[in-house]
Image (tube, rainbow, N blue to C red):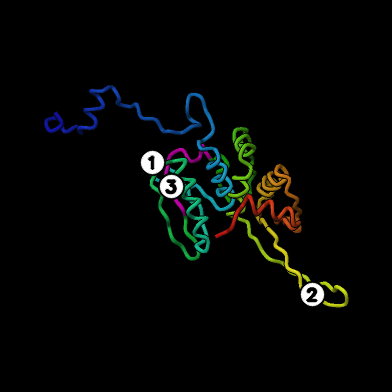
Amino acid sequence: MSRATGVSRAALRSWRDGTRGARTSGCPRCASVPGPPEPQAAYAYLLGQYLGDGTLSRGRGNVWSLRIACADSYPLIMAECAGAVRALRPNNTISRLHRQGCTYVTARWKHWPCLFPQHGPGMKHTRAIVLEPWQEEVVGRHTAEFLRGLFHSDGCRMTNWTRRTVAGVERRYEYPRWFFSNRSADILALCSGSLDRLGIAHRFPRPDTISVARREAVAALDAVVGRRS
C-alpha cells in the first residue's frame, strides 16, 4: 500500500492503529490540567539559569530555541545545565554553540515560552520579571536549586582580605565572600527573597549586587551552590 499510494508506512500504520494525530506536545502547561514541569527540581535550577544567562528566540515553524550561556571555564556547570534541560526534555537534541569565552547550551521546542513566560522583547532589566503563581510554588519547594541556578549564572565566590594589628603585630586575614550581580531589580529581589527563605544573611553593597559575607552565611550558601567548576 505504501508503494502504491506513496504514503509512508508510518502514516499507514498510525491510520490502521487509530493513533493518527494522537501525539501531544508534551507541554505540562498546555495539558487539560496544567501542572508544573517535571522534575520540578531540574526546572527550578534551569529557571535560575534562564533568568541569569538565558534567552529564547523563535525560529522557523514557530519553534523556539532556549539558549543558556555557560562560561567555558566552568565545564561542570555547563554539564549540569545541559543535564537539567535533558531531564525536562529527554527526547530533545541538546547542542552546544561555541563562542569566545562561552558556550551556549541550546535546545529547540515549540513550548519553551510556556515554561518561561518571563520571555519578552528587550533585555530583562528593561522590563518586569514576575514569576507566575505555579513558578512561585516550584521555587518555594525547591529554593536551593533555584538559588544554585542563579549563582551558577550570575554569581561568583571571591576571597577578600584585610590587615589587623593584634598584640602589636600586623596580620593578614582572608575570608570568602559570595556576590550575585544582575541589572534587573526584579531578579535581584527573587534572589534576595530566596536567600531570606533559607535564612542566609546578605546585603546590597551596590544597587545591582548582593553580597553574602558572614561566615555562617557563606557556609550555608556554599552548601547550596557548591563549587563553581
Q: Position of residue 183 (x, y in %)?
A: 66, 54
| Circles 3 and 1: CB atoms closer than 8 Å | no
Q: Give the range drawn in magenta.
A: 105-115
| Circles 2 and 1: CB atoms closer than 8 Å | no
33 displayed left or right of 141: left
Label 2: state its secondary structure: strand
Q: Nearer the viewer, mark 3 or mark 1?
A: 1
Which residue in the structure is indicated by mark 3? 107
Which residue in the structure is indicated by mark 1? 91
Earlier residue among tags 2 and 1 = 1
Q: Which residue is drawn at 11% across and 30% down?
A: 4
Q: Where, by quadrant of the figure, is residue 3 drawn? A: top left
| CA distance separating discs 2 and 1 | 57 Å
On screen, residue 126 above or below 157: above
| CA distance separating discs 3 and 1 | 10 Å
Earlier residue among tags 3 and 1 = 1
Earlier residue among tags 3 and 2 = 3
